Amino acid sequence: MATIRKRGDKYEVQIRRSGLQHVSKSFHALKDAKAWARHMEVQADRHELPSDPKALQQVTLGELVARYRDTISSQKRSSDREWFMLSTLLAHPVSRKRLSEVTGSDFAAYRDQRLQDIKPASVKRELAPVRHLFEVARDEWGLPIKENPLARLQFKGADRRRERRLRPRELDRLIEAAKVRRNSLVVPIIRLAVETGMRRGEILSIRRSDIDAVNRTLLIRETKNGHPRTIPLTKGALAVLQHCPGEDRVFPMTPNAFRLAWQRVKARAGIEDLHFHDLRHEAISRFFEMGLNATEVALISGHRDMRMLARYTHPQRQLISQKLDRATLEGDRLPNRLMHPTTPPSQRFWRC
């Protein structure tokens, strides 16, 4: 807040903000003092004033990480996974540095060290909550952090996005292998994943009250992005849900129990390099092949970013070839007068 005081024949202006360095200036005219005060207050609101070094000297990176872990990360559905990621950073010497000393080069060194043990994609996931941590500390906790030290951190390496889809008869082999297992829930879970494109956690959290058989819809309450959505159900998906024995929870099974069952089913079916999440890729690609547009598919899949939706879309190349062949055949059937107009170019008129 700006304070203007008259000292002798001059007006002294002082700007004081928590976490920012105090600034002051003297003017002969009161109007000049007020104009400068307004200008500096705008800069303070935009965090453009120099930060107070004492505020960042009093906090270590480890203290900031621990606060984020206990107050922000603990409220997330992925809290267990983030706890492990943040604990790895807390055990590193960089966590003992004062915030006034932490720079982007510190995290570059941490990244390079972790790359010796894990893949680039895993390091990127580990540092994602740390990047968010600095945003929260600046915007919500009032720390005078001018620039996020991870904002320009690069992650080199090949793009490892998966394009795995079900190959011919693989779904049948999975179903046959799952039928011989004592747990009768594995088969309907696999079928539902291919019919709806739902994630494993979303499927396991379905409750009987979320199913609307009349309107053929399903309410998904617990989603990855925290936004519940209602999706339409195919006849096959509705039949799967109606024939499951669960009363409250349709699939009373823990995530770890299903993970182990999935591994055994794959081994029995003799299928390699297939993740359960690949069934989501398969379902979304099938939706596009059915003729649904991007908005309709996003309504089902829950994607709020069309760029991310595009990463889940892997149309079969043979189907594209068939479409190209049909288009070429239709072009060959066009009348010759359309393909080779006899009217001279100078006499043709085009309408927009």
Image: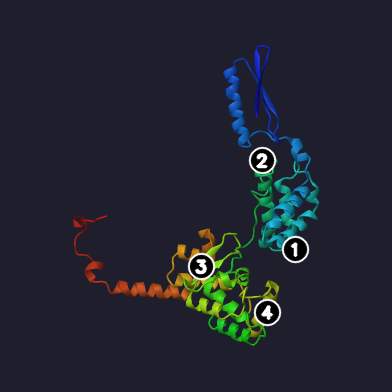
Give the Cα distance between marks 4 and 2.
49 Å
2 vs 3, front mark: 3
Q: What amino acid type should be assigned to the residue bearing mark 3?
A: Ile
Bin the neighbour count of mark 4 within 10 Å (Cα to Cα): few under 14, some 14-19, many 20 and up: some
Residue that label 3 marks:
231
Residue 166: which quarter of the image? bottom right
Element carrying mark 2 = loop
Which amino acid, mark 4?
Answer: Ala
User: Residue 114 at x, y = what percent?
Assistant: 74, 59
How much space separates mark 2 and mark 3, taking CA atoms?
42 Å
Residue 214 visible here: yes
Foreground mark, 4 or 1, reads 4
| Camera-side mark, 4 or 2 | 4
Residue at horizontal 52%, vertical 79%? Answer: 239
The mark lying in front, picked from 4 and 3, is 3
* Closer-to-camera residue (138/326): 138
SS category of the residue bearing label 1: loop
Which class describes the residues within 10 Å of circle 3: few (<14), some (14-19), or many (20+)? many
Q: Which residue is label 2 attached to?
A: 146
Name the spot of residue 281 as percent of width and height, x first: 55, 70
Q: Earlier in the sequence, mark 2 or mark 1?
A: 1
Label 2 CA crowd tier, 10 Å (few <14, some 14–19, many 20+): few
Residue 232 placed where, x, y %? 49, 69
**CA distance for labels 1 and 3:** 40 Å
Kind of residue at disc 1: Asp
**x and y percent of residue 47 in the render?**
63, 37
The residues tagged by marks 4 and 1 sit, at their Cα atoms, a distance apart of 28 Å
Residue at numbered disc 1:
117
